[in-house]
């Protein structure tokens, strides 16, 4: 069995919204690899404590960390150190036995009045996890763990796509049915501060969000972002983690990011 941890960047509102894109990231791993991955992350956090005096149990929320907002400002970390820690964090991801799927919803491309952002993103994500597991072993199953707050909407979506699920065909104007069969249980809530894996998903989703802001929308990063943390830096970090990305999720993007609508 596999465990899939979810986190997002941006709001899932539409047509009213505060962020023009929404990124949903899934970090999934086989349960037999979970303990070793957890220990590796824990060792990394202990090293951050030794080298930067960053507390082991403090949640690492990448957006606020890079922008030096509370509570991270109290640690008096320089821009150089914050970027260096982010570098090391991405190198850690590359060393873990995990896979990552990223879904990016570009609200600027939505043309229908009623569009459920989270429903679409989660449907695309779950479909791709199932497709990946089918290649490994059709008998494999997975469950979802997510930060509380959206599990109600996620439960509604996952129950729906297990009953009926239409997928657009690449070769035919008509969709075909393919219900989700490998997902077990409803999405289970867990506070991100209590889960290193959800915090990993947060790291990746924020970097993909920044990538989308610049590469897809052509907009600038937040004004508080360190000047040296530009799109070149973001792409270098995504390159560092690239081997962990499920590149088969989308053949249209070099990082396998599923961008929708096209």
Image (cartoon, rainbow, N blue to C red):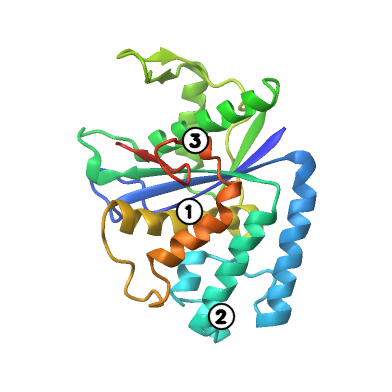
x 33%, y 50%: residue: 21
Position above or below: 242 against 142: below
Res 143 → quadrant: top right
Q: Position of residue 154 (x, y in %)?
A: 48, 36
Circle 2 residues within 10 Å: few <14, some 14–19, many ≥20: few
The residue under the point 45% across, 32% down is 124
The answer for how far apart the CA atoms under marks 1 and 2 are is 21 Å
Q: Kindly report which numbered mark, 1 or 2, lies closer to the viewer in this rendering.
A: 2
Q: Earlier in the sequence, mark 1 or mark 3?
A: 1
Q: Looking at the image, which residue is at 48% across and 76% down?
A: 70
Residue pointed to by mark 2: 81
Who comes first in sequence, dot 2 or dot 3? 2
Residue 29 at x, y = what percent?
A: 68, 42
| Nearer-the-camera pick, 155 or 120 | 120
Quick check: 97 above or below 195? above
118 lies left or right of 17: right
Find numbered disc 1 in the image and state the secondary structure of the residue it sits on: helix
- The residue that mark 3 highlights is 249
Q: From the viewer's perspective, is residue 66 above or below residue 96?
A: below
Q: Position of residue 254 (x, y in %)?
A: 45, 45
Looking at the picture, tell me which residue is in the foreground, 151 or 90: 90
Occupied quadrant, residue 95 = bottom right
Q: Is residue 80 visible?
A: yes
Nearest the viewer among 255 and 203 is 255
Please tell me whether mark 1 or mark 3 is closer to you in this view: 3
Residue hosting label 1: 205
Q: Whole-percent x and y of residue 41?
A: 71, 60
Q: CA distance from mark 2 to mark 3?
A: 33 Å
Please report contact status of discs 1 and 3: CB closer than 8 Å, yes or no.
no
Q: Are marks 1 and 2 in contact (CB under 8 Å)?
A: no
């Amino acid at each position: 069995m596999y465990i899939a941890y979810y986190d997002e960047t941006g709001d899932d509102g539409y047509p009213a919204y505060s962020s023009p894109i929404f990124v949903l990231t899934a970090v999934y791993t086989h349960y037999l690899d979970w303990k070793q991955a957890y220990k590796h992350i824990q060792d990394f956090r202990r090293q951050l404590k030794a080298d930067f005096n960053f507390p082991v149990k403090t949640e690492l929320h990448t957006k606020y960390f890079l922008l030096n907002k509370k509570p991270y400002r109290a640690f008096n970390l320089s821009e150089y150190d914050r970027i260096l820690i982010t570098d090391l964090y991405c190198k850690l991801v590359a060393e873990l036995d995990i896979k990552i799927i990223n879904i990016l919803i570009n609200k600027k491309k939505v043309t229908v009045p009623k569009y459920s952002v989270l429903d679409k993103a989660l449907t695309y994500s779950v479909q791709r996890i199932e497709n990946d597991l089918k290649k490994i072993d059709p008998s494999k199953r997975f469950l979802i763990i997510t930060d509380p707050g959206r599990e109600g909407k996620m439960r509604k979506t996952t129950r729906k796509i297990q009953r009926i699920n239409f997928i657009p065909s690449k070769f035919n104007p008509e969709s075909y049915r393919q219900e989700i069969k490998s997902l077990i249980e409803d999405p289970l809530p867990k506070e991100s501060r209590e889960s290193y894996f959800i915090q990993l998903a947060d790291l990746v989703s924020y970097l993909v969000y920044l990538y989308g802001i610049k590469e897809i929308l052509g907009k600038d990063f937040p004004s508080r972002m360190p000047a040296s943390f530009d799109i070149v830096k973001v792409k270098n970090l995504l390159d560092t983690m690239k081997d962990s990305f499920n590149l088969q999720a989308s053949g249209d993007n070099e990082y396998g990011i599923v961008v929708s609508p096209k």
